[in-house]
Amino acid sequence: MEIQTEISAMGERAVTASRVLASLSARRKNVILQAMADELDARGADIKAANEEDMQNARQSGLSEAMLDRLKISDSRLAAMIKGVRDIAGQKDPVGSVISRWIRPNGLEILKIRVPIGVIGIIYESRPNVTVDSSALCFKSSNAVILRGGREAAQSNAALVAAMQAGGARKGMPADAVQLVSTTDRAAIQALVQLEGRVDLIIPRGGEGLIRTVMEHARVPVIKHYRGVCHVYIDADADANMALAIVENAKCQRPGVCNAIEKLLVHETIAPQILPVIAARLRELNVELRGDDAARAIVPDILPATESDWTEEYLDMILTIGIVKSDDAAIDHINRYGSHHSDAIVSNNTVANKKFCVAVDSAAVYVNASTRFTDGGEFGMGAEIGISTDKIHARGPMGVEELTTYKYVVRGKGQVRD
């Protein structure tokens, strides 16, 4: 079938499913989500076998170790996916909740009520857990979802979706509530983002090339889950041991994810004491260090940084280091070169911390903590559909509530307008 025709048909089926979803009770949705989780558990061996096929293909194609880490479904990660679905089932259902209510002088009662968005298209790369998290979150919020994962995870995604569809169907999940685009042809992306009237929202998660493709071709609204060019800034009044621990965690725990730091800024007054210690520790962990002239003057064997280093998302064991003269200089640097994702200050100076939180234009701003906490689970939302770097509708980790919009319900007793 021609790709455009296939995607269009998926959109039509998703619209039909979304109308059924809108009327499902919270209890019924939770029963279906638990059945999805049960089937993921039951098919664990099949899912891991499919993932191993993807892993072998990825190794042969030269995928980096960090990207292989994103692709891998280990026992613990599969268990986390299953737990995430169960946690979503246990969350309060936002659909139908009253955001606000008021009565006008003429007696009209006005209610602002949460409702589903409708049909959501998720376009993403590498991480199979996005398949499960997105499906469960969209279903809980009564949205139909069309998933288009990357070719590197094709077998994994197919196995995960098949399990969720089978488990959900046993308990009455509407047909086509969760659909997976089977073709890896990039033409499917363009077709999906142009489904006006059938897709209500597109959420892309991936590299700059994917995001640009989506934005150039989209005819429906897009919430970008863009690059994670995240920073830690060590202020002049930082605790050295705390700074070292935060930098190590933010860079090295999982370097291939969007909330890992790519840049380190250090105030010039503390840099001579703290930077050699940090550089030595990161080298022990096999981090490649690049830096500006001031950083290289303190640690001479750091590689020279180029202008492009300040904006690049490595998703690997690479860190670029800069020395700044002031808090204002650090803030200006982050706002200029960052991606408005997650940025942290390490400081015992309350004035500096307050200024940083107010002035840094990012979705998540941290004081004395690792950027690795920008995550729906760590924020107490359960699973997330991604981390929005946009400012309109949703920003930061997007959970169930962020996948709803609202409508006004107006109740009267025969009022007419004069």
Image: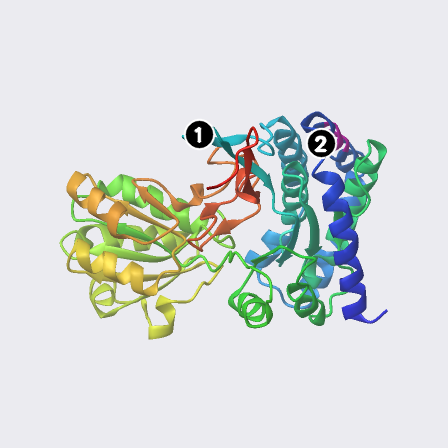
| Majority secondary structure of magenta residues | helix
Residue at the left extreme? 269
In the displayed structure, 39 sits above or below 321; it is above
Secondary structure at badge 1 equals: strand
Per the model, the C-alpha gap separating discs 1 and 2 is 30 Å
Q: State the residue in front, 213 or 347.
A: 213
The three-letter amino acid code for the residue at tag 1 is: Trp
Outermost residue, front direction? Answer: 418
Residue 103 image position (x, y, % from top left): 44, 29
Looking at the image, tell me whether mark 1 or mark 2 is earlier in sequence order.
2
Q: Residue at x 20, y 66 (%)?
A: 294
Which of the colour schemes (rainbow, by chain, secondary structure, one colour) is used?
rainbow
- Residue 193 is covered by the magenta coloring: no
Q: Residue at x 52, y 44 (%)?
A: 398
The percent coordinates of residue 107 (x first, y second) are 47, 28
When the figure is inspected, residue 74 is found, relative to residue 283, above or below; the finding is above
Range shown magenta: 31-35
Q: Indicate left or right for 344 with 348 as reference.
A: right
Q: Position of residue 183 (x, y in %)?
A: 77, 64
Direction from residue 287 to residue 398 in the image, left or right: right
**Residue 105 appears in which quarter of the rendering?**
top left
According to the picture, the residue beneath numbered tag 2 turns out to be 29
Image quarter where the N terminus lies is bottom right
Q: Amino acid at mark 2?
A: Lys
Graded by Cα atoms within 10 Å as few (under 14), some (14 to 19) or many (20 or more), the crowding at tag 2 reads: many
Comparing marks 1 and 2, which lies closer to the viewer? 1
The quarter of the picture where residue 403 lies is top right
Find disc 1 in the rendering and name its residue.
102
Give the crowd class for mark 1: few <14, some 14-19, many >=20 residues within 10 Å.
few
Q: Is residue 100 visible?
A: yes
Q: Secondary structure at mark 2?
A: helix
